[in-house]
Each structure stands twice: as C-alpha cells, then as structure tokens.
Amino acid sequence: MKHIKLVLITLCIVSMAACTDALIGDEGKLDEDIYLNYKTITALELPFDEEWFVVNGGKTHREGAHHFINRGGGERYAIDFLIVEDTIVGDGTIRKIHYSGDWKQNENHYCFGKRLNAPGNGKVVKIVNDVEDNLPGNKNRDQPGGNYIQIDHLNGETSILAHLKKGSIIVAVGDIVVKGQEIGKAGNSGSSDVPHLHYQLQGTSGDLEWLGLPAQFLNYYEDDILVGLGEPIRGQIVKKN
C-alpha cells in the first residue's frame, strides 16, 4: 500500500515547535466576538482558476502560522496558496511537490506566473508593481509585501494579494474591479522564499481597522467536495466552482 507524505513548505513563518493551538489576541473578547465568530461581508471567491494547495490557513496556530508573526494585526488569518503535483518517489511514497527540475528557478515552480483574480468587487486603493522577484531560497525583508494589490470592498473590508510577479499587475489605483477579473500574476517578490500567493482580508474602518479577519469564500471545491461557504485550511486542495 502506498503511503502519502506531505512535503512541508516554509514560507517566511517562524518556528512553531514550542507553541500550542490556542488562539492569540489582545483580549479574549476579540477572539470570541471578532475572530471566531466573524462573518465575512464581501462575497468572496478564490482568486485563481486552477487547483491550489493551502500551505497556511485556518484559525489555529498549527493551521494558520501567520498568527505568530503578526500578533492581532492584518496578517492574523492570512492564507498562503501555491500549486502542487503528486510525485511518486522510489519507496512508493506520494509527495506533493510544488516545482519540477531546478527548484532555484522561479519558472520551474508550478504557480509562478499564474493568473490571479480579484476575490471580490471593490476599488483598487494601492499597488506596488516594481519589486524584483527573489531567487527561490532568498527573501527581500526590506519590502515584505513585494508586489501587491490592495482592494477596498467599500464595506469595511479590504483584500490584499501579495508577492506578485514584477510588472504583472494590470490594474491601477482608482480602478473599480469585479469579482473574477484578472488583476495580476503569482510571483516570488518581497518576504517570500518560494513562489506563492499570500492573501489576507482585513478591516478598513471603525473597530475593525487593520485587524486581520477570517475570510469565507463562496462556492468552491475543498479536496473535491463542493463547499457553499467556507474557510480554506492548511493541507487542502481548493478550486473555485
């Protein structure tokens, strides 16, 4: 019988060895009333067209990982996605691999240059589009977001898509975008050591200003099971319907 083994991918996340799955926040009230029970206002869909793998995502330390690097801030429930393929190695183990050939070449990573879409309707309020892509294994800590786009959904929520490919963003500040519209391509810029997409939902006004929020997506497949509304969790393969 073949054994399935998941390749663990490190994407600028600090060590979790001594941590538990407990949630963190400034106050328990924030955890319960905002983080645990928050219902996404924006009608979101996954911001890509193919099957992607969830590297980090979820409400626990073990699943989310971004909890550690941004205590209570905008990245709290950020999700990292990339594309993997199953490869059978010599002992019959199936490994999920995110590149072919020389891993130090961005073009050999399956998600590099793939189309990215607006996850919801809104207005583009900020972009960065001129940061060089890193060679895999390196990070640009001086420009952590790399090339990114910020979309204000005009309802108190904002989406940020980060680490995009240099020069690939095809919208401008002030543009109105609609859900599913192409906005750029996946890259490896900023504090990123392999090509992937970093997505986060955060507040933009009032009590939720700049707080990272759980992002619930509509109508997508989660490990081949259709989900009407859900939050991608680490280890899942997801694709919009």
Image: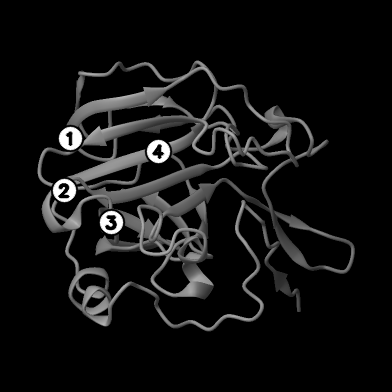
**Neighbour tally class for label 4: few under 14, some 14-19, many 20 plus, Cα within 10 Å:** many
| CA separation in Å, label 3 and label 2 | 15 Å
Q: Which residue is mark 2?
A: 42
| CA separation in Å, label 1 and label 3 | 20 Å
**Based on the displayed image, in which of its 4 quarters is residue 78 positioned?**
bottom left
Q: Which residue is mark 4?
A: 161
Q: Position of residue 229 (x, y in %)?
A: 23, 62
Q: Nearer the viewer, residue 44 or 136?
A: 136
Residue for point 60% across, 58% down: 13
Q: Which residue is mark 1?
A: 121
**Based on the displayed image, in which of its 4 quarters is residue 6 positioned?**
bottom right
Tell me the element at label 3: loop
Residue for point 25% across, 27% down: 125
**Neighbour tally class for label 2: few under 14, some 14-19, many 20 plus, Cα within 10 Å:** many
Residue for point 45% across, 37% down: 162
Label 1 near label 4: C-beta < 8 Å?
Answer: no
Is 101 on the left or on the right of 199, as rendered? right
The kind of residue tagged 4 is Leu
Label 2 near label 4: C-beta < 8 Å?
Answer: no
Residue 48 seen from this side: no
The kind of residue tagged 3 is Leu
Is 79 on the left or on the right of 53, as rendered? left
Q: Nearer the viewer, residue 96 or 215?
A: 215
Q: Which residue is mark 3?
A: 211
In the image, residue 96 above or below residue 34: above
In the image, residue 171 above or below residue 117: above
